[in-house]
Amino acid sequence: MNQEQALDEIVKYINGPDGKDPGSVLQFVCDYLRKVDARYSWVGFYVVKGDNLILKQFSGEETEHKKIKIGEGLCSLAVLRNEIVNENDVKSNKTYLACFPSTNSEIVVPVRFHGEPIGEIDVDSDTKDAFGMRDEKFLEDLADLLSQQVKTVASEN
């Protein structure tokens, strides 16, 4: 995947002629990322609601982890630390909350509004060592681009 082209396509979708609600934008991003990068086996957006992370949009297999208590798993670590968590071998990490037996790597990138985490982009891969610095930068740029959509979705009931 050419990540610059992917960002351009996402911006085109957001700025397209039809008004799009924030939830449909996030769903498009989940589906699009899985389509253009075979390493991305599952992509989801969680939002912070009180002491929990709530799954809002995702692409891939259904997960039982629709609500994660902050303090549990790699997802909440990204919010607690307000930094990217890039685990190249989830099976060796005791804090990992297993969603799918096939997952080997996970990257979680906080989505921030005025510097504070309001949600996150969570990407799983069936490949070990799937994500590098380019993925971190790309997903961080994407998180910045989508912060308003995530904020809106987070404020919904």
Image: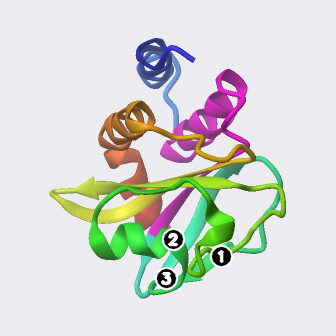
Marks 1/2 in contact by CB < 8 Å: the verdict is yes
Residue 111 placement (x, y as % from top left): 35, 54
Alpha-carbon span between mark 1 and mark 2: 7 Å
- Residue type marked 1: Leu
- Residue type marked 3: Asn
State the SS at label 1: loop
Alpha-carbon span between mark 1 and mark 3: 14 Å
Range of residues picked out in magenta? 21-47
Q: Residue at x 58, y 73 (%)?
A: 93
Whether residue 47 is situated above or below residue 52 in the rendered picture: above
Q: Is residue 93 visible?
A: yes
Residue 26 placement (x, y as % from top left): 54, 42
Residue bearing the label numbered 2? 74
88 or 82, nearer to the observer: 88
Q: Based on the displayed image, in which of its 4 quarters is residue 112 positioned?
A: bottom left
Q: Based on the displayed image, in which of its 4 quarters is residue 145 positioned?
A: top left
- Residue type marked 2: Leu
Residue 63 placement (x, y as % from top left): 77, 66
Residue bearing the label numbered 1? 97
Compare marks 1 and 3 and give the one earlier in the sequence.
3
65 or 135, nearer to the observer: 135
**Circle nearer the viewer, 1 or 3:** 1
